[in-house]
Amino acid sequence: MKLAVIGGGAAGFFAAIQAAQRGVDTCIYEKSGKVLSKVKVSGGGRCNVTNVISEPALLVGNYPRGGKELRGPFTKFNSSHTRDWFEIRGVKLKAESDGRIFPVSDSSQTIIDCLLKEAEEQKINIHLNTIVSGIQKKENHFEVSLQNGKVVMFDKIIVASGGSNSLKSYQWLIDQGHTIVPPVPSLFTFNIPDNPFKEIMGVAIQEARIKLIGSKLSQEGPLLFTHWGISGPAVLKLSAWASRWLFEADYNFVVSINFAPSFNEEQIFDSLLLTSSEQSLKKVRNSPCFKLPSRLWEILCSLSSIDEDKKWAETSKSSLRKLSQQIVATELNAKGKTTFKEEFVTCGGVDLRDVNMQTMESKIVSGQFFAGEVLNIDGITGGFNFQAAWTSGFIAGSSV
């Protein structure tokens, strides 16, 4: 049996390896000059391989798209299987406090080297700078047309071509009869043109709640101030769950930040009144509350019109009320997004109703399988997108 895997990313490699291990003559076609480029840049170059969550019922809760459909696949191959697969091949992994799993080396090259070594051992042919221009299903085989004019015959195909922000990229799949959920970006940071926190870029808050005004969408987690706006896990998660909503809003929206999500506004106001009586002679700006960074506290005071030299005893209840409101609901006007070029994730792709999720085989074209981000599956930040790639790749490759 001869198999062509279209795409040399995480899902493509994993699928190819599974098939080759089962005696299938396998090759990978990669349109660019390098393979595993997303693996290289992910997690700041450290590669967030997966997450500690392995129970399928819990794992699926981290996928804005595809969670329900992944329940079955995760019983076959989940994050525990991923860890075992890499560690058996000599890659030592570690779990960080937030549940993300990285190689102990803190280098994505460790993961790349492991996959390349396995591909070499399984005698997988890798064709770089090779663009597939068309795939035609004949009676019992596929004709794969390459842009250089060559036509190659294969028995089976695995499409692992990744996500794209252009519907045009999926045209050949549409021509086959597949339904494509229109792609829009997911996992991005928010641009705040008039950002009052610009001067504290690099400052992080360990726990904040971020809400999109005009929707029911919100997320909690660490928040990072940047020179262009806000970032961090809370923002990235919110962008994933709200990707369609944000697209329809043309990325012009209002975001509300709660810097003390463990408390409601009344509790914060009461706490500020207590601090006012206990530290009456101290300056308000010099007395951060709720474990907030001092520079952030100063800006919140400024936004609440509390002067630099104002002491607690001199601060009116109305000013404290304003400060408590600012702590629980600082509103910022966002315009646009920032997507890190090679690290972008796409919401959209091949409609999962066109795919047998037990085998990853197309219901439209028999003998053609799918793996990875080409499918309408995407996870929040934390290693979940790679886990979907490993799982779908494992199932597609072992089903061929």
Image (tube, rainbow, N blue to C red):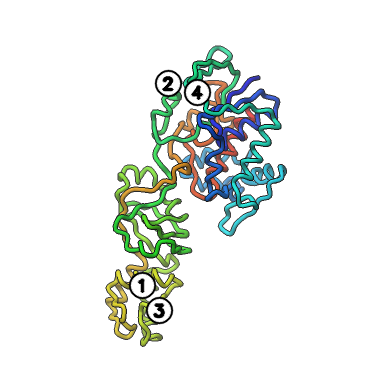
Q: Residues within 10 Å of mark 4 (few under 14, many from 20)?
A: some
Q: Could you tell me if the residues under marks 2 and 4 are in contact, i.e. CB atoms within 8 Å?
A: no
Q: Quadrant of the N terminus?
A: top right
Q: Quadrant of the C terminus?
A: top right
Image quadrant in which you'd find residue 181: top left
Q: Residues within 10 Å of mark 3 (few under 14, many from 20)?
A: some
Please tell me whether mark 4 sits on a helix, a strand or a loop.
Answer: strand
Q: CA distance from mark 4 to mark 1?
A: 57 Å
Q: CA distance from mark 2 to mark 3?
A: 64 Å
Q: Earlier in the sequence, mark 2 or mark 4?
A: 4
Give the image location of residue 191, x and y in percent: 35, 52
Q: Earlier in the sequence, mark 1 or mark 3?
A: 3
Q: In the rendered image, which residue does mark 2 sit on?
A: 175
Q: Could you tell me if the residues under marks 4 and 1 are in contact, i.e. CB atoms within 8 Å?
A: no
Q: CA distance from mark 3 to mark 4?
A: 63 Å
Q: Earlier in the sequence, mark 3 or mark 4?
A: 4
* Residue at the (68%, 32%) spot, across then down: 120
Q: CA distance from mark 1 to mark 3?
A: 9 Å
Q: Could you tell me if the residues under marks 1 and 3 are in contact, i.e. CB atoms within 8 Å?
A: no
Q: CA distance from mark 2 to mark 4?
A: 15 Å
Q: In this rendering, which labeled residue sits more in front, label 2 or label 3?
A: 3
Q: Which mark is residue 132?
A: 4
From this viewpoint, which residue is outermost toward the top?
Answer: 139
Image quadrant in which you'd find residue 4: top right
Q: In the rendered image, which residue does mark 3 sit on?
A: 287
* Residue at the (47%, 60%) spot, across then down: 222
Q: In the rendered image, which residue does mark 1 sit on?
A: 298
Q: CA distance from mark 2 to mark 1?
A: 58 Å
**Amino acid type of the residue tagged 2 in the rendering:** Asp
Residue placed most toward the observer, 259 or 6: 6
**Amino acid type of the residue tagged 4 in the rendering:** Val
**Amino acid type of the residue tagged 1 in the rendering:** Glu
